[in-house]
Amino acid sequence: VNDRTMFRRADRLLWRSFAAEVLVAVPGRDDIDHLEGTAAAVWDELKAPRTATEVTDRLCVEFASPAEVVGPDVEALLKDLVQRGCIEVTR
Amino acid sequence: VIDETPVGRSVRAIAGFGLDCEPHTPVEVDEDTWPEFKSRLVAERLTGLAVAAAEKGKLVVSDGEFTELSDAHREVMLWALDLERTLIELADAFDDTGIEFVVLKGPALAHSSYPDPSWRPFMDIDLLVRTRDWRRSCALLAELGLRRRLVEPRPGFDERFGKAACHINDKNQEIDLHRTLVLGPFGLWMEPDELFDRTSGFELGNHILRRFDDTALLAHACVHASLGMRESLLVSFRDVAQASESSSVRWESLLDWAARWRLRPVLRDAFHRTEEKLGARCPIALSSMLDSDPTKSEQRLIEAHTSERRGRGGTALTTLQALPSLRSKAAYVRTLCFPSSDFVKESSGGGRLSYVRRWAIPIHWALGRRSR
């Protein structure tokens, strides 16, 4: 994973978005992930493939926060979402 | 019966949210009636529409009420997503076995008619298979570990007179396997195999599943809203209004089915009740049919499903009248009066008086006829 690594929503997911939250069902798992707040915002940004920096830049504008605060959160979330199978690395 | 209480009016306004007929003024609910309003939204499967209405300012709620509404909606969405996961597993199994199927109602409507799938909750999965594939489909579901809720009343009944069989999996999810769309005379007159030629695709988790095309989807929404339950849920009427908004509906096909499958009273009942409850205007393309008065026999047929006659064997009686030959009528009566002991045991909880209870309805009919 580097600055140019692109992330996108995984292909075979089932999901619903409402009231600023997202529910994601990954095939082959029994549980369903519940994304709220920054996690839901990251999910929303990944409707198109983006790098971690691109996601961070967009959330900085949305939440009016500096990149030093948002960046580490975004990186941790992307890592977690990849592990859960909700998103995948494209290149 | 139209509920004209303030809560009833508010719930109906939410059922119309996002349609051309939606009220201009936002829905406001006071603190005292909020609990009843919320539980009615849940019962009528309108939480998705209510959340969307609140986000658009068409439903005025406090922060606490919005949280309650979102919590309730999350519960039904979790259920729907898990059902969709099961649906994809079933789709793979049906495809591997070479059995054609069409996804009916909830998931099909949510992903094709509604602007957002979160607007349309659903509680089970309905699949239509051809009658010739019925046995193989039941066997496949059994092989996958699903249990049929109620055994067949007598061998061969399903293919001849049945509509669907409910199967349960280990998550307690219901999968209704259909071979036709409705029980009773309309189910006998419709030709569901023809509807297999009127399908389209929808995407679910990178799978393309078959659903009815927009015209057949609307026809089925009407059948379900009119005949599905004695008092159908508001979401069923919303489905009718929602499916009517598609520009791909071929109205001449609906008129053709109405004539050939004798669906006129069903379409008339569904569209008129949708207009009464939601304020959605009946389609102009059908106005000559919808404005005509129902005949007495059409009225009787609808009442057999929608009045108290439904609970007193009304559907069975009209089925009997609609069956084409004496032989099939005799087979139907024989099954109603003398179903297998397993069926009686399962359907009644196993009391000794089960057969007597079954015979009470035809005896009541016979005595009723004599006293007239």
Image (tube, coloured by chain):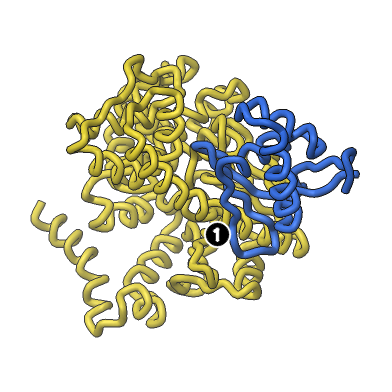
Chain colours: A blue, B yellow
Q: Picture quarter containing residue B116?
A: top right
Nearer to the camera, B69 or B144:
B69
Q: Is residue B133 above or below residue B255?
A: below
Q: Is residue B262 visible?
A: no
In this image, A50 relative to B114: left or right? Answer: right
The kind of secondary structure element at disc 1 is strand
Q: Residue A65 in the image: x percent, y percent?
A: 63, 30
Q: Eyeballing the image, is B360 above or below A38?
A: below
Total numbered badges shown on the rendered structure: 1
Which residue corresponds to the image point at 58% horizontal and 25% vertical from the top-left? B249
Q: In x, y percent, where is residue A26?
A: 68, 56
Residue B108 visible from this viewpoint = yes
Q: Is residue B28 above or below residue B100?
A: above
Residue shown at the point (27%, 57%) measured from the top left: B313
Q: Residues within 10 Å of mark 1 (few under 14, many from 20)?
A: many
**Image-quadrant location for residue B346:** bottom left
Q: Is residue B289 left or right of residue B203?
A: left
Q: Is residue B310 above or below residue B220?
A: below
Chain for numbered disc 1: B
Query: Based on the displayed image, in which of its 4 quarters is residue B222 positioned?
Result: top left
The structure residue drawn at horizontal position 8% and vertical position 56%, both measured from the top left corner, is B371
Instruction: Read off the residue under disc 1.
Output: B177
Between B20 and B75, the one nearer to me in the picture = B75
Going by the image, does B81 lie left or right of A82?
Answer: left
Q: Position of residue A72 (x, y in %)?
A: 72, 44
Quarter of the picture containing the N terminus of chain B is top left
Q: Residue furthest bottom?
A: B352
Q: Amino acid at mark 1?
A: Leu
Residue occupying image coordinates x 23% and y 57%: B312
Horizontal and vertical percent position of residue B260: 52, 35
